Amino acid sequence: MAKATARHILVDSEEQCISLKKQIIEGAEFSDLAKQHSSCPSGNQGGDLGEFGPGMMVPEFDKVVFSAEVSSVQGPVKTQFGYHLLEVTSRTD
């Protein structure tokens, strides 16, 4: 069964999500921005969500995590919780 590890940043607006993604592209550290801006409790750990399998996260999240290139920042991804930036840190198929 597929497994992945990922980290994310959860914010309220698409605009903030886009702004944070731009900062990461320009060299800001993902984990630092997660600690500063994420409204998810995982922000305290730099956005780290640990290991999980398909179906353990909301469908919009799963779709990206199990298809995106490892180590690339994806998003904004809209879910019922808000807007996410996602980075798959590892994945086994």
Image (cartoon, rainbow, N blue to C red):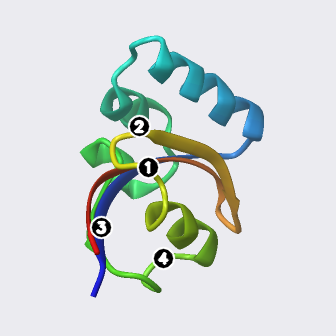
The correct choice, above or below, for 63 with respect to 26 in the image is below
Q: Which residue is mark 4?
A: 57
Residue 51 is situated, as x and y percent measured from the top left of the image, at: 24, 70
- Quadrant of image for the C terminus: bottom left
Closer mark to the observer between disc 2 and disc 1: 1
Q: In the rendered structure, are the residues bearing label 2 and label 1 in contact, judged by CB atoms less than 8 Å apart?
A: yes
Residue 89 is situated, as x and y percent measured from the top left of the image, at: 28, 50
How busy is the neighbourhood of tag 2: few (under 14 within 10 Å), some, or many (20 plus)? many
Q: CA distance from mark 1 to mark 4?
A: 12 Å
Q: Which residue is mark 2?
A: 34
Considering depth in this image, is 72 or 57 the residue closer to the camera?
72
Whether residue 7 sits left or right of residue 59 in the image: it is: left
Closer mark to the observer between disc 1 and disc 3: 3
Q: Earlier in the sequence, mark 1 or mark 4?
A: 1
Q: Secondary structure at mark 3?
A: strand
* Residue in view at x 47 percent, y 11 percent: 26
* Residue in view at x 60 percent, y 77 percent: 59
Considering depth in this image, is 64 or 40 the residue closer to the camera?
64
In the picture as drawn, the residue positioned furthest to the top comes out as: 26
Closer mark to the observer between disc 3 and disc 2: 3
Whether residue 28 sits left or right of residue 91 in the image: it is: right
The correct choice, above or below, for 21 with respect to 48 in the image is above
Q: Secondary structure at mark 2?
A: helix
Q: Earlier in the sequence, mark 3 or mark 2?
A: 3
At label 4, which amino acid type do we have? Met
Q: Which residue is mark 3?
A: 4
